[in-house]
Image: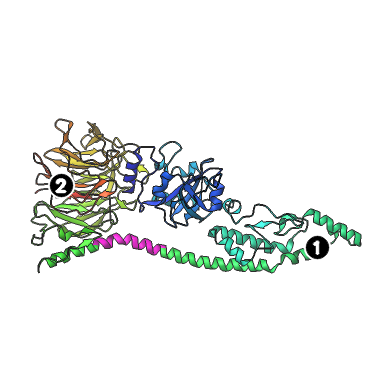
Amino acid sequence: MKSALKMGARKKESWSSTRNLGKIQLGGVIFGATNITINECLSKLLFGLPKEHLQYVEKIDPGLPLFLLNSADRKLHGVFEAASHGQKDIDPYAWTCEAKQKTPFPAQVQVRLKSARQPLTENLFKPIIVDNYFTRTHFWFELDHSQTSRLLSLFSSQPVSASLFTTNWPFVSKKPENGLKEKTFCMGFSAETVNSDTLDDCLGTVGKDEKELVYMKLKELSVNSKFLDPNEDEAACINVGPHFAAHEDETARKKGDPPSASREDTTLEANTSSMRDPIIAQLIEKVEDLMAFKTEQSNKIDCLEKNIIFLVQNLAEAQNEIRYLKHHCGMLESTVGPSEEPDTINGTTSSNEFHSDDSPDINLDSCDDLIFLAGGYDGSSWFSSLDCYSPSNNHIKSLKQMNTARCSAPVSILNGQLYVFGGGTRGVWYDTVESYDPVVNEWTSRPSLNAKKGSLAGATLNGKIYAVGGGCDNEFYSTAEMLDLDIGAWIPSRSMLEKRFSLAAAELNGVIYAVGGYDGRNYLKSAERYDPREHSWTRIESMNSMRGCPCLVILNEKLYVLGGFDGNAMVPSVEIYDPRRGSWMIGEPMNYPRGFAAAAVVKESVHIFGGLKTGEEINHTVECYKEGQGWESLDTKASGRRCFFSAVSLPSN
């Protein structure tokens, strides 16, 4: 879903400063700086952008990963995280020359350093966020979860950087104090003033890797203190300047004592004694305790994160189970009388309200107008559900759930069974395949696809299922593969002429047609067909409009392409292709714009369900089309609020 919406946004006006990701979709944010402003960003722990970026900066919650791009050298610094909610004018005078001036970057967030790593050059981070570039050098700063995860992985492979936490941060002293003694400063504190409290203050602002660096340095100082050379000024945290050593030698000469060079034992013992300051031992002990505590906390956090991931992954399946149980509860209630209170799930009507209480249950064996609805997304949950809907009874029934929740996965019929393949959830695509047997109401695992992919299309031809197009991450496919049950595997077939992501496909008279989609740069109006007798794909006349994520159904020996995304918006328009004429004609438009919807044909009627209407608004309506009668909105909510799902009807006997 995210990839398809992102592609739609990318084709909008290139001057737009935002991707318009929703708060749920926002995985991270890149902030900008220059050589002039970057030091203030780091010293104030405050990032900012111009006011037009405020609409998504305000979606930032504490803990969200953040990155800082220096536009001067095109290097990306990280890793940071939000320490506050994004808001306007946290510091209304930041990055200004005069106190009275208003900041040019009011979209602000307070930050903290999570892990200081070597910055990434543009040739390293650009492949990860290439979809965000709308010019050669300009890109949108909003990152989805997949991009953020890949950036974090890339940063974790970089060596630790000392520059972010030894030169630019507010707790770092940049110059030693003047005086008789020259002092080397560690993390902004002199060896004479540092103590356990100041160490905690210092270490509390940096990440685990940086704390380990400080700890190792202190350990090294402690060990090396036994072997200090008094003439090496930079070997210790407290050094004696050369002018002071000369003063000592002159004093010793006047007293008749040997010079410092001949007093190795005495000087070394004094120096060693001075370096064996109990503060050093206390510091090391304090750091050891702190790191042990941090390790324990890190382990607890890792455990919590795993539990959260497990809960999130099972949330959709749990909600589907609730939906399934509520439906059957409604069925039981209908035997004793109507329910007094309507059931709702996530604010939408549950499936037992899609029909009247006195409507009959669906008999899979005798009903001849069944439409099966598989998987999908309702704006908050991913579905593993399978439902069958009878238009004649205006009744929907929940069947056995799939083994996996799926979006953007096609459904095809083979030997009376439903095959669902590919698709995925949360931007993760699958290669798994499963089939449903309506006779026994059971799902069975089938041979996997040759690659993980989503937003692909499927069709059945000559006793074999073809999977065509689709994509994974930032790759878009023209490939096709064929499921041969005799062999028990998917066999590569002839590739299409174009890459097509979010396309539609269908079989008519022994030929597979593929229409529309997205090739990684443009939405497509082109169409092509595959004839197994020729073992090749051939171009047919292009549609009148570009269409990504349309529906394609067969009615009266003609192809109907319904809705889709034209590069700017979801559309209600319909185009019809007659293979006998070899041309497209404009059909009657639907009552609602739809993309990522599901459609099927029963009894010479087209039914289209749900889909996206505008932006992220999900359509819950159902429309029916009959040739010569046009489109009619049905008084049903058979699909509920649902998109990125598939529909299929059993062929007539």
Q: Position of residue 325 (x, y in %)?
A: 20, 65
Quadrant position of residue 320: bottom left
Q: Amino acid at mark 2?
A: Glu
Residue at 10% in and 57% down: 365
560 is within the stretch colored magenta: no
316 is within the stretch colored magenta: yes
Q: Nearer the viewer, residue 132 or 303?
A: 132
Disc 2 crowd rating (10 Å Cα; few below 14, some 14-19, many 20+) is some
Q: Residue furthest front?
A: 100
Q: Which residue is mark 2?
A: 623
Residue at 71% in and 57% down: 183
Label ID, residue 267? 1
**SS at mark 1 in the image:** helix
Q: Earlier in the sequence, mark 1 or mark 2?
A: 1
- Residue 70, above or below 287: above
**Tally of numbered tags:** 2
Q: Amino acid at mark 1?
A: Thr
Residues under numbered marks 1 and 2 in contact, where contact means CB atoms less than 8 Å apart = no
Q: Which residues are magenta?
A: 305-320
Residue 128 at least partly seen: no
**SS at mark 2 in the image:** strand
Q: Position of residue 431 (x, y in %)?
A: 31, 51
* Marks 1 and 2, how far apart at CA: 95 Å
Closer to us: mark 1 or mark 2?
2
Disc 1 crowd rating (10 Å Cα; few below 14, some 14-19, many 20+) is some
Q: Position of residue 370 (x, y in %)?
A: 13, 52
- Residue 139, above or below 363: above
Residue at 52% in and 50% down: 158
Left or right, 646 with reference to 37: left
Q: Position of residue 157 (x, y in %)?
A: 50, 52
* Magenta span main SS: helix
